[in-house]
Amino acid sequence: MDFLRLLLVFLHILGAAAIVGGWLAAFKTPTVTQWQWIGALTQLITGILLVGLASMGDGDGPNNTKVAVKLIIALVVGVAAFIGRRKAKNNETVPKGLAHAVGGMALINIAIAVFWV
């Protein structure tokens, strides 16, 4: 069970890297890349699985308030990445605010994960 948890954490970190890395790489000409979309999906799926594993273990389980806040932000990132990726795929202009929302909100979610104890 520990290997599964570590694998999910690894994939969760890769998802965050894909989102924030793609955002920083295209900061001057904001867009939403395919890897940001994949990263957003990875973050959502692995995050939900990690919470499930934490809930199954002994002890108090996860902080449900923190999980709820992070889930709401992850959903915002996922929806924004979906809309931005669809626009980019159809050769439409991705609004700067939408592109920056994907990376910025993901960065906020990382900060919450690190600093909210």
Image (spheres, rainbow, N blue to C red):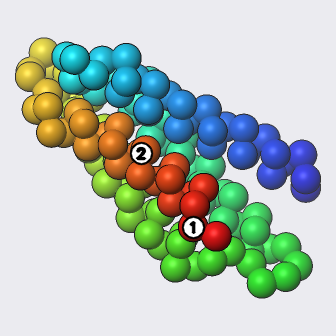
- The front one of 99 and 88 is 99
In the visual, does 82 lie left or right of 40? left
| Observer able to see residue 109 | yes
Helix, strand or loop for disc 1: loop
Q: Disc 2 marks which amino acid? A: Ala
In the visual, does 68 lie left or right of 29? right
Other residues around mark 2 within 10 Å, as few (<14) / some (14–19) / many (≥20): many
Q: Residue 20 at what x, y percent from top left? A: 44, 32
Write down the quadrant of residue 31 in the picture. Answer: top left
Q: Which residue matches tag 2?
A: 106
Sequence-earlier tag: 2 or 1: 2
Q: Residue 38 at what x, y percent from top left? A: 46, 31
- Label drawn at residue 28: none
Q: Which residue matches tag 1?
A: 116
Which residue is pictured at 8% across the width and 22% down the height? 93
Other residues around mark 1 within 10 Å, as few (<14) / some (14–19) / many (≥20): few
Q: Is residue 25 above or below residue 7?
A: above
Q: Quadrant of the N terminus?
A: bottom right
In the visual, does 38 lie left or right of 103? right
Q: Quadrant of the C terminus?
A: bottom right
Which residue is pictured at 57% across the width and 67% down the height? 116
Q: Is residue 24 above or below residue 64?
A: above
Q: Give the Cα separation between the discs numbered 2 and 1.
A: 15 Å
Q: Residue 61 at what x, y percent from top left? A: 74, 78
Which residue is pictured at 57% across the width and 61% down the height? 115
Q: Disc 1 marks which amino acid? A: Trp
| Observer able to see residue 34 | no
In the visual, does 46 lie left or right of 2? left
Q: Residue 112 at what x, y percent from top left? A: 51, 60
